[in-house]
């Protein structure tokens, strides 16, 4: 069983899977925390009727950063998930999704939800930039 991960290569696939999953979870957690904080900041600014262009600019910049973080985490997780699904014959990594079916389905679902979140975050970022444009115009 361990041969599925390390045969024919000095590079340990299992370690890369764990690191990729950690990055995926941490990056999406950071983006979630930022979304909560920015929601509270935006709501409080609109309640006070003091939504300045500087605040909107800061939110637009951070939105763009969060889009990049979420997209990179989705790509990293998706790349490792694809290796688990298809394997890599050149370095003799076998497919593992036929062995860990339930785990692979959960990872696939998480990647799909993350991809959807990336698109939604991109759309919200565009709305933020348009709002900034209307404010300074």
Image (cartoon, rainbow, N blue to C red):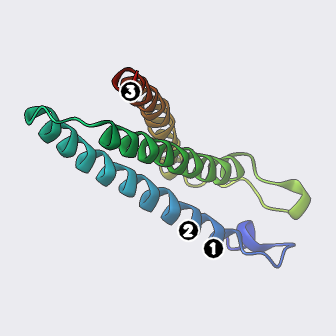
Could you tell me which secondary element the residue under label 2 belongs to?
helix
At 49% across and 30% down in the image, what residue appears?
A: 119
User: Looking at the image, do the residues carrying marks 2 and 1 touch, with CB atoms under 8 Å apart?
Assistant: yes
Question: Quick check: 1 left or right of 32?
Answer: right
Residue 79's x, y, as percent?
A: 67, 49
Question: Quick check: 132 left or right of 64?
Answer: left
Disc 3 marks which residue?
136
* Alpha-carbon span between mark 2 and mark 3: 45 Å
Tell which circle, 2 or 3, labels the residue nearer the N-terminal end: 2
Disc 2 marks which residue?
18
Furthest residue to the front?
A: 137
Quadrant where the image shows the C terminus: top left
Residue 89's x, y, as percent?
A: 87, 55
At 76% across and 57% down in the image, what residue appears?
A: 94
Label 3 neighbour load within 10 Å: few <14, some 14-19, many 20+: few
Furthest residue to the right?
A: 90
Tell which circle, 1 or 3, labels the residue nearer the N-terminal end: 1
At 68% across and 74% down in the image, what residue appears?
A: 2
Disc 1 marks which residue?
15
* Alpha-carbon span between mark 2 and mark 1: 5 Å
Could you tell me which secondary element the residue under label 3 belongs to?
helix
Q: Relative to 119, does residue 114 appear above or below in the rendering? A: below
Q: Of tags 2 and 3, which is closer to the observer?
A: 3
């Amino acid at each position: 069983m361990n041969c599925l991960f390390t045969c024919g290569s000095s590079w340990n696939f299992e370690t890369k899977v764990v690191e990729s999953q950690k990055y995926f979870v941490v990056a999406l957690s950071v983006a979630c925390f930022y979304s909560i904080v920015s929601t509270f900041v935006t709501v409080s600014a609109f309640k006070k009727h003091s939504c300045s262009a500087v605040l909107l600019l800061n939110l637009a910049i951070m939105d763009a950063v969060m889009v990049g973080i979420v997209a990179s985490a989705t790509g990293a997780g998706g790349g490792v998930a694809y290796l688990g699904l298809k394997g890599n014959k050149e370095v003799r990594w076998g497919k593992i999704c036929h062995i860990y079916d339930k785990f692979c389905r959960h990872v696939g679902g998480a990647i799909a939800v993350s991809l959807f979140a990336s698109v939604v975050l991109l759309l919200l970022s565009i709305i933020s930039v348009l709002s900034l444009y209307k404010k300074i115009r």
